[in-house]
Image (tube, helix red, strand yellow):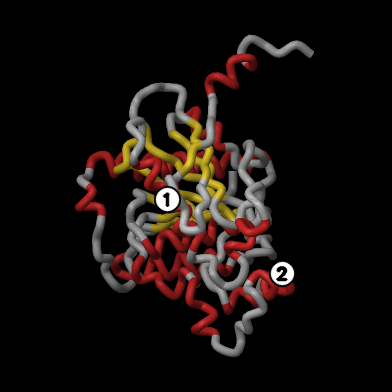
Amino acid sequence: MRPSATSSKIPSLFRSRGFPASPKRPAGRRSKASPRPPPTARRSSAFSLRRRAPRRHYRSPTGSTNPLLLVAAGYAVALPNPRGSTGFGQEFIQGIWGNVWGEQCYRDLMAVADALAARGDIDAGRTMAMGGSFGGYMTNWIGTQTDRFACLITHASIATMAQFTGVTDHPGWWYLEMGGENPYEDPERFDRYAPLRQITKWRSPALIIHGERDYRCPVNEALNLFEALQYHGVPSELLVFPDENHWILKPRNIIVWYRAVLEFIGRHLSAAAASPPARRTRTPAMGRAASRGRRHSGKA
């Protein structure tokens, strides 16, 4: 089959390339990301996408979370491969082994964010971050560590650590991933990198998405996170798909997913453009009366 005139233009329209996020990494290595510029040459917001489990590698868009649709909407997209990704050797992969998810991987991602902010074609005041599964955990952790992003989207994520042990359908993997550390002996210590334990530091507006039939990262993780953000007055919204599991796979639900994601991003990045950065940093009010969130049910 011969390609159409339209399809032959796609590679040049959605071009991408890798770049080092920083001149040097702590272990003498470089952190790489693949930025995908929007079709226009104007200054644009950065859309930083992180997804899947540890020990994966970003090379090309696959599945329902296709970054090219976001590029077509006018966003620059960065696809980081932080510590724990494949393709850079076993030592690089083992960099997140054990209960250390909130350490080097987070620093690598912030190095990518710094590199993006330094680019002349990126509006550093209008950046956001999102991720799913392990990337959802990292997005949650980012929310408790920095307010540099105008908004966050977290999908099929983990918000607890010790509590998560008893609800996932794969506890054997979790024990191994946490380096054999006993979650029952000292739950508070085990939770040292649990986003929910540091929820009082979260400032950025958040969209939380989850499938109700997710048994790998059960929906109670999303409910816990949403309730905690609501209690602390953080603008937050919850989108639950009753007929989906870990990933959104039904075509009608994928449409709902993208509509919700693009609407949320557009709304908050537009608000960021209208507000000075200093005003976007706030101390959230305590209590349910301060809630500004919305509950959604993911039905087309």
Q: Which mark is residue 173?
A: 2
Residue at horizontal 54%, vertical 69%? 100
How many numbered markers are drawn?
Answer: 2
The residue most toward the bottom is: 185
Residue at horizontal 63%, vertical 62%? 94
Q: Secondary structure at mark 1?
A: helix
Whether residue 46 appears in this view of the structure is yes
- Closer to the eye: label 1 or 2: 1
Horizontally, residue 107 falls left or right of residue 232, namely right
Question: Is residue 216 shown above or below 277?
Answer: below
Position in image of residue 196 (x %, y %)? 46, 72
The residue most toward the right is: 1
Residue at horizontal 62%, vertical 80%? 181
Question: Is residue 235 shown above or below 16?
Answer: below
Horizontally, residue 280 falls left or right of residue 140, namely left
**Residue type beneath disc 2:** Trp
Q: Which mark is residue 111?
A: 1
Question: Is residue 20 shown above or below 108?
Answer: above
Quadrant containing the C terminus is: top right
**Residue type beneath disc 1:** Ala
Q: Are marks 1 and 2 in contact (CB under 8 Å)?
A: no
